[in-house]
Amino acid sequence: ATYDPAGSVPASEALFARAKAVTPGGVNSPVRAFNAVGGTPRFIREAQGAWLTDVDGNTYVDLICSWGPMLLGHAHPEVLAAVTAAVARGTSYGTPTEPEVALAEEIVRRAPVEEVRFVSSGTEATMSAIRLARGFTGRDVVIKFAGCYHGHVDALLAAAGSGLATFAVPGTPGVPASSTELTLVLPYNDRSAVEKAFAEYGDRVACLITEASPGNMGIVPPEPGFNAFLAETCRSHGALFVSDEVMTGFRASAQGQWGLDGKVEGWTPDLVTFGKVMGGGFPAAAFGGRADIMRRLSPEGPVYQAGTLSGNPIATTAGLTTLRLATDEVYAHIGAAAETVKTAVGEALTTAGVAHTIQSTGTMFSVFFTDGPVRNFDDASRTDSAAYAAFFHAMLEHRVYLPPSAYETWFLSAAHDERAVQTILDALPAAAEAAAKA
Ligand code: PMP
């Protein structure tokens, strides 16, 4: 029951055909393709504030926000001015620079880390954090949760083994069994699974890595005290607790997910990974944590890690300017807009009789097309993808660009003003009807 207004986006279709001839699936990251919902991805020509314009001249309210980074909206004038000035001074030197120091200071000021090292993607951040955890502890085993995505790191593209505390198997062709045979994959929000794994392998565990609040299976918040329990369990076994805040960092709140739980409950992760918002729309990411751990990195310590474009002056200028503009008012605005949209989505789906569950953490939320609650990946997998596909296309028809997959967070920005929010609200009843008929 999905539809794509065939012929109405000829310029996107033409580009997609060209793209498919030279790029696998026509896209440079799989979720951009419309494989889960059908149809032609819109090729975007430009973006301003909350709005995307495609190559056919259609405008859409953007609920992807580049999958999180665009906290202030697109082409924010102050970010543009800072970036333009930085570009004019040269784009990369391969030497230390002032903006990377200032951005590191800003991150250390907000987040529970004493030192940070910059990289260029969230994948590099988690890969490096795991190497550092292994190098620091002298242990090899890594624990992750099913449904948590940490980028395309071999050891983390893992699927649960056959038993609860058995080692994982590769999650994709191309990952050798040897890369996942030291990874344990557990069900999220399941304390007894964590206890069992640590009881069996505790003295071999280098780290447990978790999304601070999972957002890559839709939003599945940690149950109250779950992150504190993980931090304490790691501590008591001499393992490191790695909190992946690539998505939630400077997004769920000014201090990320940690600002919502760890800060209140009084615990600190050993290592944290960041990305998305801290790059202001450029390729920048970071990992950081306790100084005694971070100092094991080269050149100070023996654990090797490096990058030609790490801490790039343009990317760090964009990130620094973004974070400086990301005031409490910005988070309050995004939170209020999210409340309005969530309430309206819930009402529209209820009126149309569509099963749904809306879950949030801080300013972030997602919509599951299934009855809740959604506590883990198995629950999330019950989402009705066909209903979502119909909903997605009806929203697109009404000029709202949702993530083209049922398992994603919907991202708002400081630029989502009344007109943008109203455009979303106006689209909802027809989309809910379409979902009901799917
Ligand atoms: N960790 C989390 C929690 C993420 O959401 C992502 C990206 N969606 C990554 C890591 C990987 O980041 P990147 O795509 O920049 O490699």
Image (tube, helix red, strand yellow):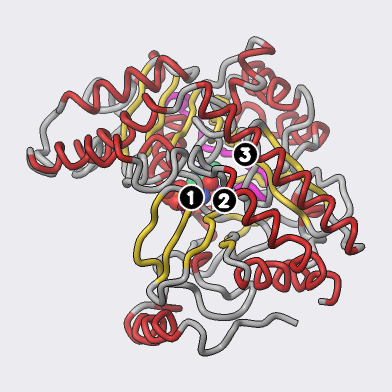
- Spatial separation of the CA atoms under disc 2 and disc 1: 7 Å
User: According to the image, label 3 marks what residue?
Assistant: 143
Badge 2 element: helix
Viewer-nearest of labels 2 and 1?
2
Q: Residue furthest bottom?
A: 7
- On screen, residue 212 above or below 416: above
Residue 390 position within the rendered picture, expressed as x and y whole percent measured from the top left:
73, 73
Q: Quadrant of residue 311?
A: top left
- On screen, residue 57 above or below 318: below
Mark 1 / mark 3, whichever is N-terminal: 1
Q: Which mark is residue 420?
A: 2
Please state the extent of the stretch shown in magenta in the rendering.
136-152
Q: Which mark is residue 50?
A: 1
The residue shown at (74%, 52%) is 367
Badge 1 element: loop
- Spatial separation of the CA atoms under disc 2 and disc 3: 41 Å
**Is residue 137 located in the magenta-colored stretch of the structure?**
yes
Residue 347 position within the rendered picture, expressed as x and y whole percent measured from the top left:
84, 51
- If the image is split into quadrants, where does the N terminus sit? bottom right
Q: As shown in the figure, which amino acid type bears the numbered disc 2?
A: Ala
Q: Residue furthest top?
A: 266
Residue 243 position within the rendered picture, expressed as x and y whole percent measured from the top left:
56, 30
Mark 2 / mark 1, whichever is N-terminal: 1
Circles 2, 3 touching at the beta carbon (< 8 Å): no
Q: As shown in the figure, which amino acid type bears the numbered disc 1?
A: Ala
